Amino acid sequence: MDIMQLTKAEEQVMQFVWKLNEAIVKDVVDQFNDPKPAYTTVATVLSVLEKKGFVTRRKIGNTNLFSPAVSKKEYTKIQFSSLLKNYFNGSFPKMATFFAKENQLDIDDLESILKQAQVELRKDQPKNNK
């Protein structure tokens, strides 16, 4: 699936749709901190997200109910892959080193990250039933 890049406003609205799973425009507006954007602005962004294939719209009476059509995990994977390819020549070690330097991580921090990654990777492996 070829997913388009989201603008900052679209991604912000999409974050709320992912969080809520199903939402009417008012639900999304209510997620924003004050000052909240106009109802019509959020409605327009949701319409654009629908045209881009990120949300689906279901009519219930006079109300539009929006749901994610693209999962947060799927979008994150695509964005991460794009970042890796476009900024680090596809090298995960280069990217990890960059973030480690930028965040002034020490060896203990890196070891902790490695241990956490091992735990997460084990969760995704199929269990052998012996």
Image (spheres, rainbow, N blue to C red):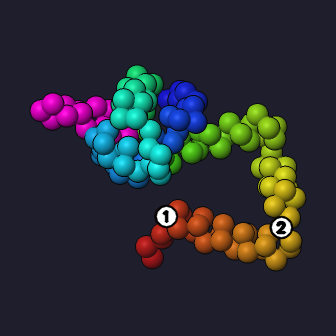
| In-image side of 92 versus 82 (left or right) | right
Would you identify the image quadrant in which residue 101 lies?
bottom right
> The C terminus lies in which quarter of the figure?
bottom left
User: What type is the residue that disc 1 sits on?
Assistant: Pro
Q: Residue furthest left?
A: 61
Q: Which residue is mark 1?
A: 126
Q: Secondary structure at mark 2?
A: loop
Q: Is residue 40 left or right of residue 91?
A: left
Q: Residue at x 40, y 35 (%)?
A: 38
Give the percent coordinates (x, y) of residue 61. Answer: 12, 32
Image spot of residue 4 (x, y percent): 55, 27
Q: Is residue 55 visible?
A: no
What numbered label is drawn on residue 105? 2
For the residues bearing labels 1 and 2, Cβ distance under 8 angstroms: no
In this view, the residue in front, 111 or 63, is: 63
Part of the protein shown in magenta: 56-69
